Amino acid sequence: MEISVEDFRTKFIRIFGDDVWNDFINFGKSKQDTKSFKSMHNVIKQLNAYKKKIANRNLYTKGKNLRFARFVLISIERTFRPQNRSIKFNKKEKLKDGHFNRRWEVEHIFSKSKFDNKFKGFTPSNSGLNKHSLGNLTIITRELNGEKQYIDADFQAKKSLIQQSKENEGLYINCIFKNQSAKSTKDYFQLLEDRQIELKNDFDKIFKPDEIGIPVVFFRDVLGYSESDIKTMLHITRRIRKWCRKRRKMK
């Protein structure tokens, strides 16, 4: 099957949702720009640009950065824990008032309201760690996230609650809650810094282009395309390389 823009869009939205798709397609564009892709060449150019948002230190602001945080965490989960690719992270549940909320939500590991006081005096290394950065974010079920005992819990209590929930405990991005050695504030800060570096490295691996310039891991492991499907994009290889050379000269 030849990968088309429409098929790519369908798979992307099924996995990440409409709001992440809108953030992706609008990224770097002005109001006058066309909010669509003419070819898969344009899609890959946009992926190469969009992935660089990983350098942003604040991924938990309402709107665009939070959407990108979902994109990062879900991509990592689907790549590094294949058995969890069946999880519908974009699934929505109907509320009593007729509105809908996602079953899975991006949430802080260490409470954003207590983070600065808890880690006061600790200076992040090159990781750029802060309360809203990737190292302190994960995805858990709305059901667990809405429980008062979880909301007010410290790390050890959250760890216990996470481990009681197979669907939350079984996520690759929640492996931090399996740590048995961190006990002190210094340990926790180091744990978050290590996680920040590890997740960023994971994300970079997902978007590392192969020898023909295509992020195969993203297309194969995140979106679910077969190797033969991906090979149908070989005809755009020269255009990708030409675009990349042009970008390097402009820097």
Image (tube, rainbow, N blue to C red):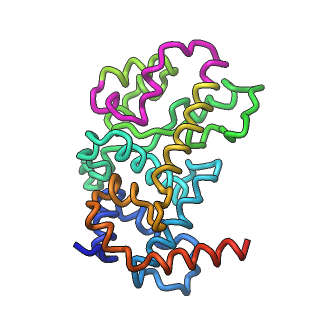
Does residue 244 appear to the left or right of 81 in the view shown? right
* Residue at 41%, 66% in the rendered image: 21
Q: Quadrant of the C terminus?
A: bottom right
For the image, the number of numbered tags is: 0
* Residue at 30%, 77% in the rendered image: 4
What's the magenta bit mostly, secondary-structure-wise? Answer: helix
Residue 170 among magenta residues: yes
| Residue 175 falls in image quadrant | top left
Q: Find residue 177 and report its horizontal and vertical position in percent.
A: 44, 24
* 211 lies above or below 121: below
* Residue at 29%, 42% in the rendered image: 82
In magenta, the rendered stretch is: 165-189
| Residue 229 falls in image quadrant | bottom left
* Nearer-the-camera pick, 226 or 114: 226
| Residue 28 falls in image quadrant | bottom right
Does residue 76 appear to the left or right of 51 in the view shown? left
Q: Find residue 100 and report its horizontal and vertical position in percent.
A: 29, 54
